[in-house]
Amino acid sequence: MPEPAPMIVATPDDAEDIAHLRNRLAQWMVDNGIGQWVPGEYPSTLVAEEAARGEWFVWREADMLAAAVRIVWRDPDFWGADDDTEAGYIHGLMVAPEQRGRDLGTRIIQFCADYTLANGVTLQRLDTAADNAVLRKYYTAQGFTELRETRLPPQFHGTTHVVLMEKMLA
């Protein structure tokens, strides 16, 4: 099992850093022909609202944002308004480019699983761009099963379809 991630609950004060990291990663995706995120589509004001609800977690090292992730308990935007399945829905899992190669993604996924279980929920869900073969393979290797493909919610623009994935937790 990977070493636990030193994640802490984000506050609205973290919103600018989280949005900035997302924009950096989105620009990298655009520059590398990956249709997943678009710079500027996830404003810091929205991140601040989500952080105020306790949905964002951050990993800081030397006062720099190394990684972030959002966990919610319902996800009608991606899974459908009629899906009332309780799960820990992972969104916006981000690792700063300069932190790559340290297996932080795996550690954050384990943090998400531990947090979900600690809240009495035994199912983890996420989505990824349907045409992002690298992330689909990565999440499959992390124990997630692909369930189906669906249209990307209209507020996002990086791609047209996402794959919905889930994993039962111990």
Image (spheres, rainbow, N blue to C red):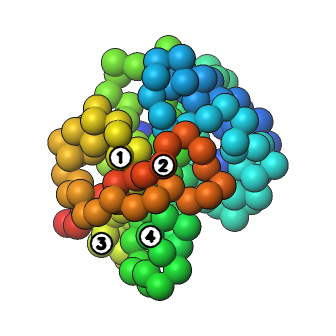
Separation of residues labelled 3 and 4 (CA atoms): 17 Å
Residue type at mark 4: give it.
Trp
User: Pointers 1 and 4 in contact (CB under 8 A)?
Assistant: no
Instruction: Give the number of marks.
Output: 4
Q: Position of residue 143 (x, y in %)?
A: 19, 51
Circle 2 residue: 160
Tell me what residue is drawn at x 20 percent, y 46 percent: 140
Which dot, 2 or 3, sits closer to the camera? 2
Q: Label 2 neighbourhood size at 10 Å, few (<14), some (14-19), many (20+)?
A: some
Circle 4 residue: 79
Separation of residues labelled 2 and 3 (CA atoms): 29 Å
**Residue 30 relative to residue 44: left or right:** left
Res 4 → quadrant = top left
Quadrant where the N terminus sits is top left
Tell me what residue is drawn at x 54 percent, y 52 percent: 70
Quadrant where the C terminus sits is bottom left
User: Pointers 3 and 4 in contact (CB under 8 A)?
Assistant: no
**Residue 98 relative to residue 135: left or right:** right
User: Pointers 2 and 1 in contact (CB under 8 A)?
Assistant: yes
Query: In the displayed structure, would residue 43 be above or below residue 102?
Result: below
Separation of residues labelled 4 and 2 (CA atoms): 15 Å
Residue type at mark 1: give it.
Ala
Residue type at mark 3: give it.
Thr
Which dot, 2 or 1, sits closer to the camera? 2
Circle 1 residue: 130
Circle 3 residue: 122
Of callouts 2 and 1, the N-terminal one: 1
Residue type at mark 2: give it.
Thr
